[in-house]
């Protein structure tokens, strides 16, 4: 059943012993939503705890301080920022068919919960949690605000991306009326890199390939490179590489190809208008949006390279 | 005479034929303030034009679209984001002693204008221009909003730095109620880099020096490196390198040293709490803030390196 935020607020207000589920391989929005909502519920006098199939990202450890540890048998299960029940990871089996309320900002495929509230215009699920708190007249404090800020900052690239609306800034302004160190959070989320990550980026950019008068740039994260950096970088350091090629001035199509197995290559494409990344990836059975999309291509490195480069050159040449 | 924003608004409202001066070596805040204010004044039916001793930054060319070209003999001269009259560059001689109103957010030394309005709590002078426009009930549109947004985004590192307050987000929310492409501006300001700049950054990072268990990181931009990249990078590409070393995880003191002449080295220092960058730079006759400061050291590369490293190691060891 699709419900609106007001109905969701009413449902939460009358619930107790609440378990809040984040998606596996968690990001700042699913964690910020879970810890923020949990803190709000505990402050309202309810029992609540969070659960995630994977470990919290080390640099987001501070989110934990928002909540007290509470043990109880859950009567209500809420998922936050989970677009599909399979994204619950190992907890899908336990909780996937007993979610009472799903709160999400992704334009989802199949709703999986008894009640679902979705706002695709929200830049982050944390925006929706903030609005829920207002609807419930729930108390706010610096810790809770820091959680909700984390999700908004994560999903907007610190207010850089086009999903950042006037409303995003209004909500952030209200969050920042509470006492927390937003600059410190931004430093942890956006500025700081491990030494290994910097070296990895350097190695990848050094070997970046340019085509079509530098309008195409491609990075190859091959098994060779991955094993060369094993032990020197965290697993997390191999994420977020997709945006690198497109950052070069003049590049209209940036591709990052990551080897997943001997003959499996995951392709991430970022484009400038009017090149459609989703259309390119659809040629290989993938998909996504006009500016960002992905697909997987099977075959030898040489085969994949020939296939992919032919498609990329064609896409750029036709503009 | 120090005046408040309301008095400044009254002064502007009764003025006409207004020349707006930016500081030399202009950034997004001085340019956004100038073009934004100029657009506001023209929309109010006044004659106004902007003037800057140096060229507009190419990626900020879009600011120009905000204003119509108007020729007139100025009756009123306003400076924006100019902390000291010498920062007017070549226009100091012509206009330095006839500024009717200085609008600025820097805690200035010697006020130089007939009227000065300063708000050190404003993250950007563009915040003050927005408030002036509200006080004057001046019309706003997407073009003007894009100028004021540019200044705020520039001076806050896209809402990352600690000068970003709740009010900063409120003003940005109001600006974004107008129609302009903030994501495109952020891309131009923060994401896109020239190929040369990327290569320069990676050459510098590759040779970055680490000391004291990686708590100190130092980048040397020597004449050798500068001449190696000459022609491959824009002059602008040598700016904004000071933040690089401090971005490495665990680095508490980052220094970037730029060779200005055979025996002249400009040092920029960024620190984490509690290391005081200003105190370190004061040892060499420089100054600045606790987290960011600068100084110039004269001598051979070897001499400067020995002097500087001794001071840096001492500062880190004493914490």
Image: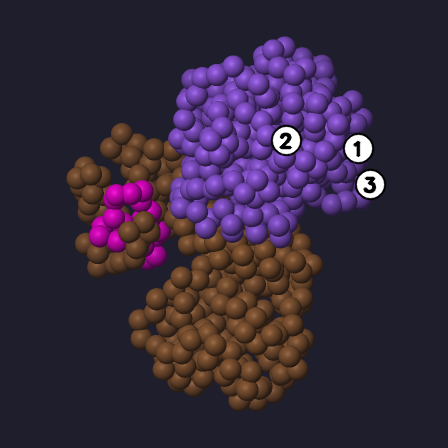
Chain colours: A brown, B purple
Q: Which residue is drawn at the image coordinates 37% and 41% (left, top)?
A: A246
Q: Chain of mark 1?
A: B
Q: Label 1 to label 2, Cα distance in Å?
A: 41 Å
Which residues are the magenta region? Answer: A257-280
Label 3 residue SS: loop
Q: Is residue B203 visible?
A: no
Quick one: label 2, few (<14), some, or many (20+) residues within 10 Å? some
* Residue labelled with disc 2: B11
* The image quarter in which residue B129 lies: top right
Front residue of B233 and A135: A135
Front residue of A282 and A55: A282
Residue B222 lies left or right of residue A203; in this view the side is: right
User: Comparing marks 1 and 2, which lies closer to the viewer?
Assistant: 2
- State which quarter of the image contains the C terminus of chain A: top left
Of label 3 and label 1, which has the lower sequence position? 1
Residue at mark 1 shares a chain with residue at mark 2: yes
* The image quarter in which residue A286 lies: bottom left
Tell me, yes or no, whether the two marked residues, 3 and 2, touch with CB atoms within 8 Å: no
* Residue labelled with disc 1: B279
Q: Which residue is drawn at the image coordinates 65% and 27% (left, top)?
A: B102
* Residue labelled with disc 3: B318
């Amino acid at each position: 059943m699709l419900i609106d935020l007001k109905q969701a607020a009413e449902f939460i207000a009358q619930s107790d012993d609440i378990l809040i589920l984040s998606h596996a391989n968690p990001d700042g929005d699913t964690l910020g939503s879970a810890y923020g909502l949990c803190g709000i519920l505990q402050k309202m006098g309810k029992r609540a705890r969070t659960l995630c199939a994977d470990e919290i990202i080390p640099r987001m450890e501070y989110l934990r301080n928002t909540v007290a540890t509470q043990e109880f048998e859950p009567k209500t299960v809420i998922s936050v920022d989970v677009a599909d029940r399979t994204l619950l990871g190992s907890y899908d089996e336990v909780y996937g068919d007993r979610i009472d309320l799903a709160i999400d900002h992704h334009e989802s495929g199949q709703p999986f919960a008894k009640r679902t509230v979705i706002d695709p215009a929200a830049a982050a699920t944390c925006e929706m949690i903030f609005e829920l708190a207002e609807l419930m007249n729930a108390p706010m404090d610096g810790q809770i605000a820091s959680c909700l800020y984390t999700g908004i900052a994560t999903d907007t690239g610190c207010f850089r991306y086009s999903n950042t609306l006037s409303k995003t800034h209004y909500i952030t302004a209200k969050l920042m009326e509470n006492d927390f160190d937003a600059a410190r959070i931004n430093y942890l989320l956006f500025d700081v890199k491990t030494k290994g990550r910097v070296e990895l980026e350097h190695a990848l950019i050094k070997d970046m390939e340019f085509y079509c008068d530098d309008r195409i740039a491609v990075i190859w994260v091959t098994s060779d490179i991955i094993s060369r950096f094993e032990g020197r970088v965290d697993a997390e350091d191999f994420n977020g590489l997709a945006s690198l090629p497109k950052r070069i001035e003049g590049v209209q199509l940036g591709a990052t190809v990551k080897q997943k197995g001997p003959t499996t290559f995951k392709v991430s494409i970022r484009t400038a208008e009017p090149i459609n990344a989703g259309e390119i990836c659809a040629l290989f059975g993938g998909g996504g949006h006009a500016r960002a999309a992905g697909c997987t291509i099977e075959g030898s490195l040489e085969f994949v390279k020939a296939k992919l480069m032919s498609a990329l050159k064609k896409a750029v040449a036709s503009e």
